[in-house]
Image: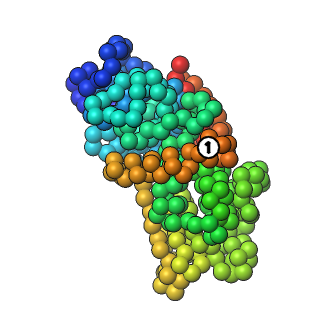
Amino acid sequence: MSPDARSPDALSSGALSSGARFPEAMSYVEVREPGGPEHLVLAEGPLPLLRAGDLLVRVEAAGINRPDIMQRKGDYPPPPGASPVLGLEVAGEVVALGSDVAGFAVGDRVCALANGGGYAQYCAVPASQALRLPKGYDAARAAALPETFFTVWANLFMMADLKAGETVLIHGGTSGIGTTAIQLAREFGATVYATAGTAEKCEACLGLGAHRAINYRTEDFAAVIAEATGKRGVDVILDMVGATYFDRNLKSLGLDGRLSIIAFLGGTFAEKVNLGPILLKRLRITGSAMRPRTASEKQEIRDQLLDKVWPLLDDGRIAPVMHAVLPHTEVVNAHRMLEHGDHIGKIVITFA
């Protein structure tokens, strides 16, 4: 997985609009071979290619996400042309511009949704996927934003069309996705129900604005939703579990309900599912992954975030929930922490 100086992963000095000099090599995190966290090692290699429309970011912090774990295991290969290095969200300083970049300058501090390559001292990101840092944010806090906020906004608001006055059930309420979704749904006027696995995590969901937190280890979320809504069901469900929740999700949706699936932690194949509610309640089932989306789709999400969500971050009405910030030399521990599942919020690694 090492970047190759002869491949598109090497810095193209001809594309730079800056006369700055750069080191010949950078430190990055390499997946030695597919497998567990112990297969992550520190390595050195060439700086990434800077294509037209790209920003070269000196990375100060990078977020850790479940797609990184899937890629580390060999289950989520990067799309063609993307860096093989892990990492889908970064924050730091713009140090060079590719051709055809407008709206950014060398020295700008940004966070960005990366197509790959975030676990490195330098990362090339499309300018169309970069955002200014919210007011008062440092790089570690800002690195917790892009992947999570892009995902939640696209799936919960653009695809599932959550509106003020509606009800929403958010599974995995204390994950990075969950803590973001609870806050955004609350701020945009929805009544929020959330699932979590411990009493402490349920309290965290309530603290973020959930109307009711459901401990999925001791309660049946479908029964709780039926009782809480007078058997009407919720308007929207944001689900990262998949197969094992599918039947109960259908039961928990109300008339014209929307189910948005963003991951399959509970498997991809659902058996003995009653599909009747889809017809009887006119349900709509959607799902998406962020990485395969086109550049124009990601830019549209970025633009909506800047317009509708970044002012909330600037004002402190919402904020990423930070679980841990670790130096990149502890990336193995960061992955173990995420996989273990005891975290509440985001895990971030930093680069000196």
201 to 81, vertically: above or below? below
At horizontal 50% and vertical 77% (from top left) the residue drawn is 283
| Quadrant in which the N terminus appears | top left
305 to 249, vertically: above or below? above
At horizontal 65% and vertical 56% (from top left) the residue drawn is 187
- The number of numbered badges drawn on the structure is 1
> Is residue 330 something one can see in this rendering?
no
> Is residue 114 something one can see in this rendering?
yes
The residue under label 1 is 313
Q: Quadrant of residue 33?
A: top left
Q: Where does the image place residue 317, in percent across and percent down from the top left?
A: 68, 47
At horizontal 53% and vertical 83% (from top left) the residue drawn is 281
Q: Where does the image place residue 185, in percent across and percent down from the top left?
A: 62, 59
Secondary structure under the numbered disc 1 in the rendered image? helix
Q: Quadrant of residue 83?
A: top left
Coloration mode: rainbow
Tell me the crowding category of disc 1: few under 14, some 14 to 19, or many 20 or more residues within 10 angstroms, Cα based. some
At horizontal 30% and vertical 29% (from top left) the residue drawn is 98
271 to 90, vertically: above or below? below
Q: In which quarter of the image is residue 202?
A: bottom right
- Is residue 16 shown left or right of residue 301? left
Amino acid carrying label 1: it is Leu
